[in-house]
Image (spheres, coloured by chain):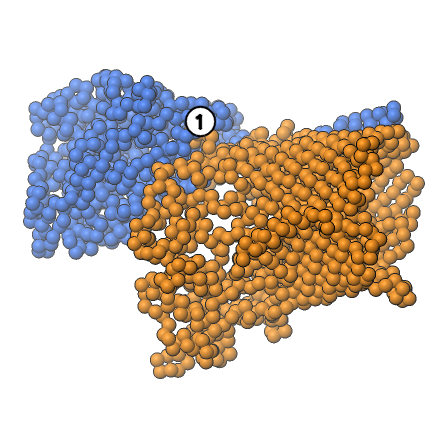
Chain colours: A orange, B blue
């Protein structure tokens, strides 16, 4: 089966580009097929003619993203932008931001976040909706990103929102109604299986069985639901489907004086919990509801002066029974044995078990209150542009201020609920335990769940002029910003330092020269300063240069029928990453107060001051040199091909120099030095084919493939006696653990093989490879000295996307498939640890080793108690994380113009959208991307209608 | 085009003249609550707080403490090291009952360059941190402008810094031989190119710091400040340093093992034998004895309490000298630990499991018990075939035995008033030797939370240092009938120590080598369980001798005959291995691999 998947993947990835594949672009917004390549593309602080671009950029139109139904914009990007790896994060509506990496991972430091720029300013894109987005560009090489200087090394995503255009008013209204369901839920043993396997586990441990045959029969036939319950907690708490809806109204138009785009959007996605709010006034239903609005207005104030106001925002309301995040309840669902206790006791009280840590998820959701949050975002900017052509032709200036704001408040109501364990006494009477938990009255709290703001000001001088064959573009700009973004995930240290604003000052420029539309040279740079470094070290210079040659404009290729376009380009430059980690202001040598010595007969210590981690006065940015070579070609005007090959060398990554600093220097904690190095190289390829624009059946295929492999060149790690434990020379995030050699066949084999110290290991237990010991040689003991690199990293090395569609008369079809390989997943959650921590047993327990199944077993023998040998972090639980997922499918029908024009409509379209419809992968027990016990990933199917006036 | 240039120039000038300074200000860090180094060295109060950190990092005692994380952690990995078990169990003094103790690694020669730090030198990181604090103090103290920090204060701080630097360096010297002498604060690793100094240079560096510290340290402090470094503490350190330096392991032309490159042998020995080193050691010990009275230090010796019974042993001279906090015999004590109960550190390392200790108690070997004479000064014969007279034997032993060892039917504390180590007895489990190491467990600990003050230097040691060094330099000398408080011969010095515990003078007419054996024996008994034996058997190069740290080790099995009579049967509880390379510690492998330290021989 696995081989079949691989073959399919290979076929799709590598043979996708044969001649029958084609591309066109269907913008469902206007329902007209337009040429795939726009004339211009968004670049850093500007636009450029697509043909003249000499840097590596991939783009996608906002209309494309509408085909995926998600409350999070990031989740619409799977497989869509070549070079961007999108990985599923949480799945719960409102808490489902996927992680993104541009061109893989280039640093082992904590800050590998892609810089998100929304209409020129840093911001959070996750709350935007596809309907307000014109285009998203991923800037990849140094030439494209250098103007963002010290923030550019991890790549830049430019989000450009829709603007008005000179056209009559166009009103668009669309709605989608549908439902979400859990793609896959973890499966657990029913009560009868649980009991009989528990007996087996006890026998393995040398203990007497706990359940009699009669009891197991009772579990099986369900004849005694109170005293021999068989509860599927997922069924008790979750519903099969949860409704989703989306409404969008937009107005767009303008004239020579003013242009506008105004949008109002509402999206809602109800949670998978049953409607507990309908059953009890002390609970509420799980809801997620968000309003987005946008008003983008351009006004020409005078002949030379124009103004632009971009205003976008959202209001997000979220609520859940119990607590705001669902992790706790889902963790319980995955840990309570199905025979532990009934949901509700015969007397109507809630079930429980004595001396167990389980709560009753049902009563928790129904009777312990609820939590709500309300989040508000505002993204705004105001720009004044002035045409300076009276000074010299082609010169203009503009200045812009931006205010971004974000605030989330919460509202919690909590109470306790008592539960009872029910049992039968010797006489056969029903008896209840004393109450477990305490019923209390509802208590409220109104927490602040997070806030941030970002002020920025920018100024620009633009120049564009053509002198004969010479075409010159020039840009000079300055930027100053001040943001209180929560970066506690990246920077550590005192709260007082973390809450200080992040400030940045800088300027940049770009000069592009095009000769005869054949030869292009571009130089761009940034000069940026950050508050995080010592005076004198605050500013850095980040230059990049690129060249391009449009060979198809040369006489020898002009009018060539086969090669209709050919461009070669190369870029090289230096960029930085200011999310370096460590504490902020590492240049300050700090001392901390404490209590220390007990002089005389004192029983309290005297005050003391001690030196903190050593300051690094020279602390600076991470830097990266990026080299990129690209080729863009179009054949027969139909087949587009782009290939980029890159090599990126990150250096000055913050490390603690554990290998070099002798401890006799006496540091309390080693300083953080800019000494780490990582190399990352790879390639991206895009192939598109589209058929004739005039043909009846229009179709297109676009595939992109991206591969990157990084290597830690230097990280100053601790010297290891066992070289296998070194992370240097390996990939970032390489898992290290024991190598499992299978399961022991006999007790003799187990007792004569290396095993963990002090454990009795038997047949059916996991056998590990002994490769080291304290002296560097195998020592017969399995411990951390035997760790070695096992498996692949969590970040796939290869990602690919396939986007295809067709259009025939009024019908259209659009499919997006994403695949990844070169990644490993680990079965580590409670569903793969039967009976451990007094927990439930997942269906994986059925694969267990028994003397009878010794030859075929894929899971070790069961233990009723925590097994200290079998569940070590090892290759035994690593599985290939490759998958191919059908991310979205849309089938639409547009009514003919003749029909709708009668009712004054420009356009009317019905469409059915499916998101996350299926996955081909190697994991039988759940979604490869979310194997934990948390909120399951969602499959969404929605029916939509769009009309345009 | 000209216009463009002009405009650009104007804009540039405007931005750079008005902007630059403002841009720089804009990026300045907002005032916070951080204490920078300049603030530390701005007031006397802050400097005092920093000095108290020096004490916290730099002071230690015979008992393994639980250092707080900041002190004990490896600055490379952040992980903390706690020494488990007292070193007594890594000598012929005792045997730890717990198998997981790292201290056991010494007994089976399992020491490696990768485990030396958890096995013994758990203060390796703390020591270098203390040296750094000392160096920072020396570097910055003169520039403190606070008028309260007058010249006298600054001089004293410098002297304290030098004392602590010398103290740390001595601890390096006794473990590793020559070490990197770090006399300044290093800003970065490129700065730090100190290789190991030769042994002679290392000792000279310790002595230099001592000599400079002595000048500016006070003779004594008021009771509330007791525990601070005094002149006498420095003299004590100097005496110990010179004694170790004169000892066979270092005072030789041929080390116990040659370094891989024989040219490096000077890192672990002087390169010649010089008897004058013993003379220097004797003089330094004498200096401690001479200056003691001035500093208020004296041997605890109440004639009536020389031979206490079990009932009044709390007043026994010997018991008082190690048990009672801040007693007159203590020159300086470790006061790094706050109040702890018997279930806290370090007592968890001392109490047997049967009494509630977690890390295991140490039982005393028969090899060691045999060193105790009877009260008349005769050798006590322990019959290999056993005997029924255990109680009588115990009763006949040196009074110091009864004041430091928890033997059968003696007392531990109020919680365990009668110790039972006979087969089937409450405290027999794990008691391989037959009796428990009771010293240094103070009975007060059993009563609640106590701030421990565990001696680092006690005056009795310096009588023995003097006797040992003087015997080597000049021979045993002349014995007085009643040894004076200020001995002038090796005989008198040992006899003075014996006298206060009711033991008779050593027999007259001992040769230098006979006397050497007697003074070594005396030292073993008087300083038992005080972290001396482990180092003494190394500097004397006797650890490899059978019965010390090599070959079969013995305990006794005790059988109850009647309520008061017990039989004993010697038996071997195990054999021990000692390899010559264990005379000096290996440097931690990580440190050696960094390429700056030459590893000791045999590792």
Q: Looking at the image, which residue is at 47% across and 59% down?
A: A832
Q: Is residue A853 above or below residue B430?
A: below
Quarter of the view holding residue B545: top left
Q: Looking at the image, which residue is at 25% across and 39% down?
A: B108
Please state which of residues A193 and A92 is positioned toward the viewer in this rendering: A193
* Percent x, y of residue A611: 48, 34
Quarter of the view holding residue A122: top right
Q: Looking at the image, which residue is at 31% across and 42% down?
A: B102
Label 1 marks a residue whose chain is: B
Look at the image and tell me in which quarter the N terminus of chain B lies.
top right
* Percent x, y of residue A661: 46, 30
Look at the image and tell me in which quarter the C terminus of chain B lies.
top left
Task: Indicate left or right for A808 with B412 as reference.
Answer: right
Q: Looking at the image, which residue is at 63% across and 29% down?
A: A537
* Percent x, y of residue A8: 61, 54
Please tell me whether mark 1 sits on a helix, a strand or a loop.
Answer: helix
Q: Is residue A232 above or below residue A616?
A: below
Q: Which residue is mark 1?
A: B135
Residue B524 in view (yes/no): yes
Local crowd size for mark 1, using a 10 Å CA cut-off: few (<14), some (14–19), many (≥20): many
Task: Indicate left or right for B248 with A30 as reference.
Answer: left
* Percent x, y of residue B79: 43, 41
Quarter of the view holding residue B68: top left
């Amino acid at each position: 089966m696995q081989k079949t998947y691989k073959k399919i993947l290979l076929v799709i990835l590598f043979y996708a580009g044969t001649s029958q594949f084609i591309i066109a672009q269907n913008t469902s917004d206007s329902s007209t097929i337009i040429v795939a390549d726009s004339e211009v593309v968004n670049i850093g602080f500007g636009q450029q003619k697509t043909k003249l671009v000499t840097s590596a950029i991939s783009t996608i139109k906002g209309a494309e993203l509408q085909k995926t139904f998600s409350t999070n914009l990031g989740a619409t990007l799977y497989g869509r932008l070549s070079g961007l790896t999108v990985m599923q994060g949480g799945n719960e509506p409102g808490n489902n931001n996927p992680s993104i990496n541009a061109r893989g991972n280039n640093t082992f430091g904590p800050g590998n976040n892609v810089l998100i720029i929304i209409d020129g300013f840093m911001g959070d894109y996750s709350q935007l909706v596809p309907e307000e987005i014109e285009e998203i560009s991923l800037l990849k090489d140094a030439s494209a990103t250098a103007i963002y200087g010290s923030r550019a090394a991890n790549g830049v995503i430019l989000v450009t929102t829709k603007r008005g255009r000179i056209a009559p008013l166009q009103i668009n209204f669309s709605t989608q109604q549908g439902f979400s369901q859990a793609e896959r839920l973890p499966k657990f043993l029913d009560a009868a299986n649980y009991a009989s396997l528990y007996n087996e586990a006890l026998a393995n441990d040398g203990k007497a069985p706990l359940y009699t045959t009669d009891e197991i029969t009772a579990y099986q036939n369900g004849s005694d639901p109170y005293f021999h319950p068989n509860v599927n907690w997922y069924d008790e708490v979750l519903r099969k489907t949860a409704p989703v809806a989306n409404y969008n109204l937009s107005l767009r138009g303008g004239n020579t004086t003013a242009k506008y785009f105004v949008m109002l959007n509402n999206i809602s996605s109800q949670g998978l919990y049953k409607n507990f709010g309908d059953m009890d006034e002390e609970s509420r239903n799980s809801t997620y509801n968000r309003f987005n609005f946008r008003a983008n207005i351009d006004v020409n104030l005078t002949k030379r002066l124009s103004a632009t106001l971009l205003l976008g925002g959202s209001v997000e309301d979220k609520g859940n029974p119990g607590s705001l995040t669902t992790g706790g309840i889902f963790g319980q669902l995955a840990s309570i044995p199905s025979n532990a206790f009934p949901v509700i006791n015969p007397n109507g009280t809630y079930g429980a078990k004595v001396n167990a840590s389980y709560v009753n998820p049902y009563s928790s959701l129904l009777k312990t209150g609820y939590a709500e949050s309300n989040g508000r975002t505002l993204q705004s900017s105001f720009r004044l542009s002035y045409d300076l052509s009276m000074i010299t032709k082609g010169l203009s200036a503009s200045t812009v201020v931006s205010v971004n704001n974000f605030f989330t408040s919460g509202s919690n109501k909590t109470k306790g609920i008592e539960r009872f364990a029910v049992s039968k006494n010797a006489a056969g009477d029903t008896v209840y335990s004393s109450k477990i938990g305490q019923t209390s009255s509802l208590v409220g709290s109104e927490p602040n769940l997070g806030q941030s703001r970002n002020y920025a000001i920018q100024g620009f001088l633009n120049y564009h002029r053509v002198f004969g064959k010479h075409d010159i573009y020039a840009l000079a700009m300055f930027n100053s910003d001040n943001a209180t973004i929560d970066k506690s995930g990246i920077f550590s240290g005192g709260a007082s330092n973390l809450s200080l604003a992040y400030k940045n000052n800088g300027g940049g420029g770009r000069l592009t020269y095009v000769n005869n539309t054949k030869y292009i040279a571009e130089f761009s740079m940034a000069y940026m300063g950050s508050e995080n470094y010592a005076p004198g070290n605050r500013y850095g210079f980040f230059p990049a240069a690129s060249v391009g040659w449009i060979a198809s404009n040369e006489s020898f290729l002009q009018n060539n029928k086969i090669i209709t376009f050919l461009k070669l380009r190369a870029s090289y430059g230096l960029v930085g990453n200011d999310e370096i980690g460590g504490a902020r202001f590492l240049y300050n040598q700090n001392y901390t107060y404490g209590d220390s010595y007990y002089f005389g007969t004192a029983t309290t210590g005297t005050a003391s001051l001690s030196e903190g981690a050593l300051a690094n006065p020279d602390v600076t940015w991470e830097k990266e040199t990026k080299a990129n070579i690209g080729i863009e070609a179009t054949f027969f005007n139909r087949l587009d091909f782009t290939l980029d090959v890159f090599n990126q060398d990150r250096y000055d990554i913050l490390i603690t120099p554990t290998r070099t600093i002798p401890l006799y220097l006496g540091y309390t904690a080693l300083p953080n030095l800019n000494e780490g190095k990582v190399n990352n190289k790879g390639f991206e390829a895009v192939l598109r084919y589209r058929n004739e624009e005039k043909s009846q059946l229009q179709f297109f295929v676009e595939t992109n493939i991206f591969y990157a492999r990084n290597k830690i060149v230097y990280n100053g790690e601790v010297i290891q006696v066992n070289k296998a434990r070194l992370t240097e020379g390996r990939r970032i995030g390489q898992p290290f653990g024991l190598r499992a050699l299978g399961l022991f066949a006999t007790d003799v084999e187990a007792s004569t093989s290396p095993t963990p110290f002090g454990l009795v290991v038997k047949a059916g237990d996991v056998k590990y490879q002994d490769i080291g010991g304290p002296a560097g040689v195998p020592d017969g003991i399995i411990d951390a000295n035997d760790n070695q690199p096992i498996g692949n990293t969590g970040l796939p090395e290869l990602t690919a996307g396939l986007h295809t569609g067709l259009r025939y008369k009024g019908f259209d079809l659009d499919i997006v498939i994403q695949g990844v390989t070169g990644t490993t997943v680990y079965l580590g959650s409670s569903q793969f640890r039967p009976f451990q921590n007094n927990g439930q047993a997942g269906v994986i327990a059925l694969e267990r080793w028994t003397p009878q199944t010794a030859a075929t077993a894929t899971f070790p023998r069961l233990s009723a108690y925590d097994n200290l040998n079998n569940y070590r972090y090892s290759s035994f639980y690593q599985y290939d994380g490759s998958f191919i997922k059908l991310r979205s499918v849309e089938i639409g029908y547009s009514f003919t113009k003749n029909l709708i024009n009668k009712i004054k409509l420009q356009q009317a379209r019905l469409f059915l959208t499916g998101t996350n419809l299926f996955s081909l992968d190697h994991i039988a027990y759940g979604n490869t991307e979310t194997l934990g016990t948390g909120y399951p990933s969602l499959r969404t199917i929605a029916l939509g209608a769009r009309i345009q006036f | 085009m000209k216009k463009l240039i002009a405009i650009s120039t104007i804009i540039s000038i405007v931005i750079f003249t008005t902007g630059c300074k403002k841009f720089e200000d804009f990026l300045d860090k907002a005032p916070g609550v951080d204490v920078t180094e300049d603030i530390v060295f701005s007031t006397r109060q802050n400097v005092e707080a920093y000095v108290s950190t020096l004490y916290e990092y730099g002071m230690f005692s015979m008992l393994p403490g639980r250092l707080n994380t900041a002190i004990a952690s490896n600055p490379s990995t952040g992980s903390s090291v706690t020494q488990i078990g007292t070193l007594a169990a890594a000598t012929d003094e005792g045997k730890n009952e717990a198998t997981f103790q790292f201290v056991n690694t010494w007994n089976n020669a399992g020491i490696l360059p990768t485990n030396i730090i958890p096995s013994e030198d758990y203060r390796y990181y703390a020591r270098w941190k203390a040296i750094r604090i000392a160096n920072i103090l020396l570097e910055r103290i003169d520039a403190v402008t606070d008028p309260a920090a007058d010249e006298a204060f600054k001089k004293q701080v410098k002297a304290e810094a030098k004392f602590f630097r010398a103290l740390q360096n001595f601890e390096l010297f006794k473990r590793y031989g020559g070490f990197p002498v770090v006399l300044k604060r290093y800003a970065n690793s490129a700065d730090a190119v100190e290789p190991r100094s030769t042994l002679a240079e290392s000792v000279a560096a310790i002595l230099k710091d001592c000599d400079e510290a002595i000048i500016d340290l006070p003779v004594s402090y008021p009771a509330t400040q007791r525990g601070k470094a005094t002149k006498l503490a420095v003299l004590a350190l100097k005496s110990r340093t010179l004694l170790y330096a004169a000892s066979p392991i270092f005072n030789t032309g041929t080390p116990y093992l040659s370094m891989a490159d024989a040219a490096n042998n000077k890192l672990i020995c002087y390169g010649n034998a010089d008897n004058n080193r013993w003379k220097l050691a004797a003089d330094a010990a004498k200096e401690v004895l001479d200056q003691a009275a001035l500093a208020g230090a004296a041997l605890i010796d109440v004639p009536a309490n020389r031979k206490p019974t079990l009932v009044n042993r709390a007043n026994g001279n010997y018991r008082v000298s190690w048990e009672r906090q801040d007693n007159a015999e203590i020159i300086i004590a470790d006061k790094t630990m706050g109040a702890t109960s018997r279930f806290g550190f370090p007592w968890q390392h001392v109490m047997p499991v049967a009494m509630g200790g977690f890390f295991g108690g140490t039982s005393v070997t028969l090899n060691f018990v045999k060193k105790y004479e009877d009260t008349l000064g005769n050798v006590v014969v322990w019959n290999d075939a056993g005997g029924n007279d255990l109680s009588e034997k115990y009763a006949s032993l040196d009074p110091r035995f009864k004041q430091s060892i928890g033997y059968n039917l003696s007392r531990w504390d109020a919680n365990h008033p009668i110790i039972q180590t006979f087969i089937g007895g409450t405290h027999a489990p794990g008691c391989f030797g037959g009796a428990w190491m009771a010293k240094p467990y103070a009975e007060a600990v059993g009563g609640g939370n106590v701030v421990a003050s565990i001696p680092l230097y006690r005056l009795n040691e310096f009588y023995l240092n003097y006797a040992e060094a003087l015997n080597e330099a000049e021979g045993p000398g002349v014995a007085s009938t009643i040894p004076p408080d200020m001995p002038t011969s090796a005989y008198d010095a040992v006899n003075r120590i014996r006298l206060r515990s009711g033991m008779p003078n050593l027999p007259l007419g001992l040769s230098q080598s006979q006397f050497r054996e007697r003074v070594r024996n005396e030292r073993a008994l008087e300083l038992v369980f005080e972290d001396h034996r482990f180092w003494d058997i190394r500097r004397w190069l006797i650890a490899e001798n059978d019965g010390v740290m090599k070959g079969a080790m013995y305990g006794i099995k005790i059988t109850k005959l009647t309520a008061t009579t017990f039989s004993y049967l010697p038996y071997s509880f195990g054999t021990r291995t000692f390899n010559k390379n264990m005379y000096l510690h290996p440097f931690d492998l990580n440190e050696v691999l960094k390429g700056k330290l030459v590893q000791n021989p045999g590792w």
